[in-house]
């Protein structure tokens, strides 16, 4: 079984800027900067045949290249139920179009449609049962963070493998966007 998702890899300078945010919050499990990405569609565990179907459908997808910027921080969950800290991706119609086409391609491959609303972001940290006391102070101190714009010229089918320090993401296939 393969654990898959479709996403956007980030250029090194953007990953370097994000890595500078990954400190100063005791209790946070910081994401390794090599794993920074923007998820377009989480797929989950599939067999080799389904992975091949997903690859086939994604390879037929056509969309144009575009530019993105990152701005501000947010969380998934609230209060003691906060699960993750993230950097927001600024809204962009080209990103929404690409995400919709990825969703349709994955559905054509036989995977049920995603029920959750698409919230483009880059995860910085995850939290166990206990949310750091200083989370709101951290967000207030770093909420003016901005990075980009940067070019988005391909999307990627990633595999997520469990490692000693958590998940490690491997690019299985890149799909170019038209310039």
Image: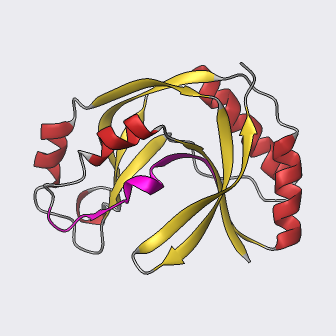
Residue 23 visible, this orientation: yes
Residue sitting at the far front: 12
Residue sitting at the far bottom: 164
Q: Residue at x 43, y 45 (%)?
A: 122
Q: Nearer the viewer, residue 11 or 24?
A: 11
Question: Where residue 163 sits: x, y (%)?
Answer: 48, 78
Question: Where residue 106 sits: x, y (%)?
Answer: 79, 51
Q: The C terminus appears in which quarter of the rendering?
A: top right
Q: Is residue 141 above or below residue 106?
A: above
Q: Is residue 81 above or below residue 154?
A: below
Q: Nearer the viewer, residue 46 or 178?
A: 178
Q: Which residue range is magenta in the image?
A: 26-42
Left or right: 148 with respect to 97? Answer: left
Q: Quadrant of residue 105?
A: top right
Q: Is residue 167 above or below residue 113?
A: below
Q: Nearer the viewer, residue 152 or 136?
A: 152
Q: Residue at x 38, y 53 (%)?
A: 33
């Amino acid at each position: 079984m393969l654990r898959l998702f479709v996403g956007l890899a980030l250029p090194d300078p953007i990953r370097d800027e994000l890595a500078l945010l990954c400190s100063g919050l005791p209790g946070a499990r910081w994401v390794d900067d090599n794993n920074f990405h923007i998820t377009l569609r989480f797929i989950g565990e599939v067999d080799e045949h389904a992975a091949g179907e997903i690859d086939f459908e994604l390879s037929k997808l056509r969309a144009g290249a575009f530019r993105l910027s990152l701005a501000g921080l947010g969380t998934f969950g609230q209060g003691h139920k906060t699960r993750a800290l993230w950097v927001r991706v600024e809204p962009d119609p080209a990103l929404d179009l690409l995400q919709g086409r990825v969703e349709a391609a994955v559905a054509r491959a036989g995977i049920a449609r995603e029920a959750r609303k698409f919230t483009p972001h880059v995860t910085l940290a995850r939290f166990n049962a206990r949310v750091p006391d200083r989370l709101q102070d951290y967000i207030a101190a770093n909420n003016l963070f901005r990075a980009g714009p940067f070019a988005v010229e391909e999307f990627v089918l990633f595999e997520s493998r469990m490692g000693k320090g958590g998940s490690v993401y491997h690019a299985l296939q890149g799909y170019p966007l038209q310039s």
